[in-house]
Image (cartoon, rainbow, N blue to C red):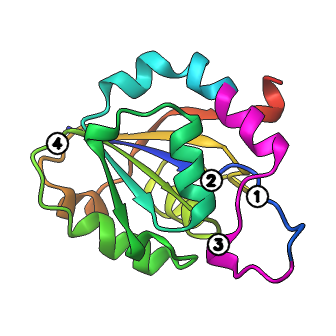
Amino acid sequence: MKKILLTRHAKSSWLDPSLSDHDRPLNKRGVRSAQFFAETMKSEFDKVQEVYVSSAKRAQETAVELKLNRAKMSTHKELYTFSCTKLENFIFSIHSDAQYIHLIGHNPAFTEFVNNHSNIRVDNVPTCGMVILQWDDVNDWSDVQFENARLLLFDVPKRQI
């Protein structure tokens, strides 16, 4: 069994046009959304064995506001991608015995991944949206590409706050 929690970074700020896309921080709404999920998803976050975070500032700040266990976290510049193919390559190349991982990254890669590798279709994984997918008969991350996952959760801040 393999299970993945995909979290799209929380809402980011566009106030400073001099910042590169990579360096944009969260805005106030983004902070509130992540803090909300820090409380409501804590028991789920505790089950996760490894957390992989995009190097983008907004993804890093999302991880901090979610109050994730830093000992489980690692930063990956490869997750600063909007390409589903690059996201797939990252996931399929994970060499880990972890059964349950958490990725914090970007759209449209996350939405396309959910649509390509699960039994559902979504229009959009919104900012701070969370999706949990599970592959019941898969033992290696490279094999998730051959089976559709079951959707266990799709939640967004707007439904809650």
Work out whether 94 lies above or below 129: below
Judged left or right of residue 137, residue 5 is right
Q: Position of residue 99 (x, y in %)?
A: 20, 39
Front position among marks 4 and 3 = 3
Rounded to the nearest angstrom, the CA distance separating label 3 from label 1 is 10 Å
Label 4 secondary element: loop
- Specify which label sits upstream in the sequence, 4 or 3: 3
Where, quadrant-wise, is the C terminus in this rendering?
top right
Range of residues picked out in magenta: 17-35
The amino acid marked with disc number 2 is His
* Place of residue 74 in the rendered image (x, y in percent of width and height, measured from the top left): 31, 55
Mark 3 and mark 1 lie on one chain; the one further toward the N terminus is 1
Residue 19 image point, x, y percent: 75, 79
Residue under numbered circle 4: 98
- State the residue position of label 3: 23
Image: 29 above or below 89: above
Of circles 4 and 1, which is in front?
1
Tell me the distance, in whole angstroms, between the alpha carbons under discs 4 and 3: 30 Å
